[in-house]
Amino acid sequence: MNTRDSLMLALLFSVAVPGALASTPWEAWIERPEPSSAKLVQKIEYTGSGSRADIGQATTRDLRTLAERIGRGDAGSVAIAVRLARTTPAGANLEDILAILGVTAGDDATRFLTALQLEGGGKSCPGVSFLGERFVDDEPARVAELERRKRAIMKVSSKWLLPIRKLCLDELQHTGGTASPVGQTDIHPIG
């Protein structure tokens, strides 16, 4: 190999490798949502030092992507959401994650309970009673949504999911139809 080829190879390697090595598991999964990369995601974090506004916009965009993948039935995405509920500090991002999990509880209860059992050790039900902003001034809608989640979870009959099913149903029963609009009993990370 001559000097010119060595320089080109070194330049190519220095440009290509740092970007690949610098991405976080969250960024890598957003870029390529594969089961192997999903298992690595433990928290939302970004490389670089963008402004708070830039990071906030990226997080909002990426949480929408997470919700879309969950809506398409991706079990790895539900597992990520459960892990993120454990590691995300209280605030808007955690509320978004809990809202995503709450919708999942009603839309795909088996996948929701499976992720709780596998990722959370079956010890809590993050998001199951979290309603979010869209239910703030609508008590009938809150009651209907909580009932929808209860009905969906009650349909799950897999024996190994029965303990986590009971835990989630107990939480929903405790929440009832008069839950705080943002489910304040459910905004703390699980752990």
Image: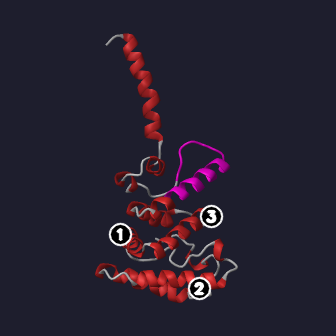
Magenta span dominant secondary structure:
helix
Neighbours of disc 1 within 10 Å: few (<14), some (14-19), many (20+): few
Between 11 and 111, the one nearer to me in the picture: 111
Q: Which residue is mark 3?
A: 92
In the rendered image, the vertical position of residue 47 relative to residue 154, given as above or below: above
Q: Secondary structure at mark 1?
A: helix
Place of residue 112 in the rendered image (x, y in percent of width and height, measured from the top left): 42, 72
Give the mark, 2 or 3, whose residue is nearer the N terminus.
3
Cα separation between marks 1 and 2: 29 Å
Quadrant occupied by the N terminus: top left
Neighbours of disc 3 within 10 Å: few (<14), some (14-19), many (20+): few
Q: Secondary structure at mark 3?
A: helix
Q: Identify which residue is drawn at 61% across, 50% down.
A: 55
In the image, taking residue 108 as reference, residue 48 lies left or right, namely right
In the rendered image, the vertical position of residue 148 relative to residue 189, given as above or below: below
Applied colour scheme: secondary structure
Q: Does the magenta-highlighted stretch encompass residue 139?
A: no
Cα separation between marks 2 and 3: 23 Å
Q: Which residue is mark 2?
A: 143
- Number of marks present in the image shown: 3
Q: Quadrant of residue 35?
A: bottom left
Q: Does the magenta-highlighted stretch encompass residue 48?
A: yes
| Range of magenta residues | 45-66
Cα separation between marks 3 and 1: 25 Å
Q: Identify which residue is drawn at 67% across, 81% down.
A: 138
Q: Identify which residue is drawn at 49% across, 57% down.
A: 43
Place of residue 32 in the rendered image (x, y in percent of width and height, measured from the top left): 42, 47
Give the mark, 1 or 2, whose residue is nearer the N terminus.
1
Q: Which residue is mark 1?
A: 118
